[in-house]
Image (cartoon, rainbow, N blue to C red):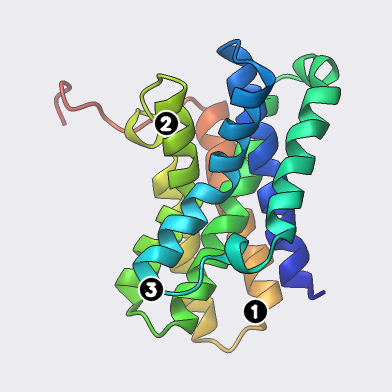
Amino acid sequence: MTVLSVLDYIGVFAFSISGILAASEKQLDLFGGIIIAFVTALGGGTLRDVLLNTDISWMQDNSYIYVATGGAFFAVVFKKAMRRIRKTLFLFDTIGIALFTILGLQKALAAESTLTVAAILAVISATFGGVIRDILCNDIPLIFRKEIYATACLAGAALYIGLTYTGMEPLINLIISGSLIVSIRVFAVVKKLRMPLLNEKF
């Protein structure tokens, strides 16, 4: 197992936990929570693979299913403890989008996508699991609301592409670019920065 595979599993695990926490907020039952966890963890990557016309990762490697399920049950077992930690859903969601943005970008570039398409697919990989989660939980998806979300993913993807051309080692590049995504998200939340709404004057 490579380091990148481990990071991929960490992203799946983190998104699965965020799915359970979101389902818990909506008071869904256990089965509903596991479904939400599954689509949150694997939905974005599935859509990316479909658009790339490549094999869908979790259908070729069942370990993704096990990791997503494990993350779901971990969140269920330690739900009360997690609720005591502020911004738990934000924490796991941020870790997930950072890892999935860069890993999705790498897969798109490996499939010889153009840089623009690769960046778009990176954002899809990182955010559309959360979009499906929010829709199923009857919420407006976070990516469409005022928070700095997809913008952070695009910034991280752009940095990764730029550093790739400098010849930086991929793992170090992933850490730096992923850290930028996390930093932008955390800074935006702490400073209450947001995108302008359509009904506001620009």
Task: Tell me if I can see residue 154 in this picture.
Answer: no
- Residue 88 is situated, as x and y percent measured from the top left of the image, at 70, 26
Q: Secondary structure at mark 3?
A: loop
Question: How dense is the environment of label 1, judged by Cα within 10 Å: few (below 14), some, or many (20 and up)?
Answer: some
- Which image quadrant: the C terminus? top left
Q: Which numbered circle lies on residue 170?
A: 1
| Residue depicted at 82% across the width and 33% down the height | 74
Q: Is residue 138 above or below residue 150?
A: above
Point out which mark residue 53 bears.
3
Give the residue type at disc 2.
Leu
Number of other residues with Cα within 10 Å of mark 3, as a class: few under 14, some 14 to 19, many 20 or more: few
Q: Which is more toward the observer, 173 or 97?
A: 97
Identify the residue under disc 2: 142
Image position of 90 (left or right of 44): right
Q: Amino acid at mark 1?
A: Pro
The kind of residue on which mark 3 rests is: Asn
Of circles 1 and 3, the one toward us is 3
